[in-house]
Image (cartoon, grey):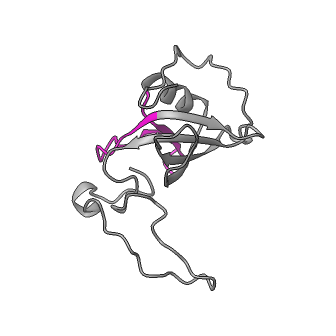
Amino acid sequence: MNDGEVIQAGWTGNTVNFDFKFTNDGLIPVIVQEASKVERPAGRVLMFAWMNRESLALTLERGLMTYWSRSRKKLWLKGESSGHTQRVVRWYVDCDKDVLLFEVEQETGACHTGYESCFFQEMDREAKPLPVRESKMFDDAAVYSPAPTGQG
């Protein structure tokens, strides 16, 4: 796949057979990373989420990240309420086929708190938070009302 090319799949329903190791509740963990300009992953980790077979198939069909919300128990298109979408550039499965890694082009920030990444809080060796060294990319209070529970 070439840089910037959107992944497309000919999915037409729930008949896609993915040869991955989903959990007992039908989910697979997904690491979402900023797309790099090189052939192997090199960008910042933006977030972690879960997918089921349907959300994975929809992601591949649309080229936009779609997840399974465990708290809301429904599919959610990343950016459906905020406009901060994630366009798929390429994706990988790990050697055990039980974790997926997606490289995406992120629109604005990935974190519902306003930061570029959900991993903005650095910790010291005593598990105490260090001062946040980056600015928010957007005002979460202005984008979300009421505030979401962990996704946007």
Q: Image height check: is 129 above or below 63?
A: below
- Nearer to me, 1 or 122: 1
- Nearer to me, 53 or 126: 126
Q: Image height check: is 48 above or below 87?
A: below
Furthest-right residue in this view: 96
Furthest-left residue in this view: 142
Furthest-front residue in this view: 38
Task: Give the side of residue 64 with respect to residue 126, left or right.
Answer: left
Q: Position of residue 27 (x, y in %)?
A: 65, 40
Q: Residue at x 56, y 44 (%)?
A: 41
Q: Image height check: is 2 above or below 139?
A: above
State which quadrant residue 105 falls in: top left
Q: Residue at x 48, y 26 (%)?
A: 2
Give the number of callouts: 0
Question: Magenta segment: does it hold 70?
Answer: yes
Q: Position of residue 89 (x, y in %)?
A: 46, 33
- Nearer to me, 102 or 40: 40
State which quadrant residue 64 falls in: top left
State which quadrant residue 131 falls in: bottom left
Q: Image height check: is 84 above or below 109?
A: above
Q: Position of residue 69 (x, y in %)?
A: 51, 45
Task: Give the side of residue 8 with respect to residue 22, left or right.
Answer: left
Q: Position of residue 31 (x, y in %)?
A: 57, 48
Task: Give the side of residue 55 with respect to residue 22, left or right.
Answer: left
Specify the segment rendered in magenta.
63-88
